[in-house]
Image (cartoon, helix red, strand yellow):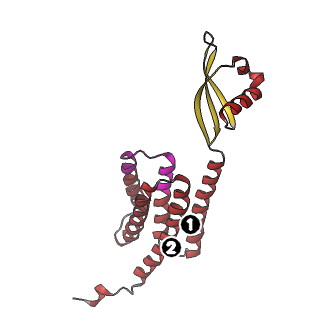
Amino acid sequence: MSDSIFDLTNPNFLGIMWRFAVNIVFLFILIRVIYFRYSRKEKFLFSFFLMGIMAFFITSMLRSVFIEMGMAVGLFAVFGILRLRASNFSAKDMAYTFATFGVSVINSLKLLKFPLLGVLIINCIIVLSAYLLEVYSLRYKSENHTIIYEKLDLLKPEKRERLLKDISALTGKEIIKVKICRVNYKRKTALLDIYYKG
């Protein structure tokens, strides 16, 4: 049996391991530091990490067989769609799934005449974008409830500010928007959707 089977000093293997280390660092930042901090969905951490690791190694190994990059991305897309159809994912979870695949595929590619620093910059842009979008969505996040309201005279458009202040005082929430769903003039009540900062 040839000793080359156990020889791990091959430059290709070492290159894959270095890129894998970079991949793990950025997956950790993207999934554990950013995604988990803002979603608190612990059940998806295992799936995202394992998908990222598998996407990295499969794409790295694809260079040894002649499969075009378009087919490889299509393969991951099919796996992602199958996974998403099997579970109740939110739009944000789907975006993080795609980001996990994307980061892993980018890190696995060994592009000729493309420096490692360029890959690190691309990873930083992706991670920073996810963080800034989380901060933005958290700042402008709103929740809503439906209430029964009795002061019909405040529902007039010119009394909008007084309506917001009155409902804010009733609920103890900072009301930013009110939508009139239905008015019952017989009972002198209105069904309102109220929106407030989460």
Label 2's element?
Answer: helix
56 drawn magenta: no
**Quadrant hosting residue 153:** top right
Residue type at numbered disc 1: Asn
Between the residue at mark 1 and the residue at mark 2, the CA separation in whole angstroms equals 9 Å
Q: Residue at x 63, y 35 (%)?
A: 195
Decide if residue 115 is in sight here: no
Position in image of residue 30 (x %, y %): 53, 62
Residue type at numbered disc 2: Val
User: Label 1, on which residue?
Assistant: 123
Quadrant for the N terminus, please. Answer: bottom left
Of 148 and 41, which appears nearest the observer? 148
164 left or right of 45 in image: right
Q: Main secondary structure of the magenta part?
A: helix
User: Label 2, on which residue?
Assistant: 22
In this picture, is 170 found above or below 26? Answer: above
Give the magenta part as a residue range. 81-98
Position in image of residue 135 (x %, y %): 63, 53
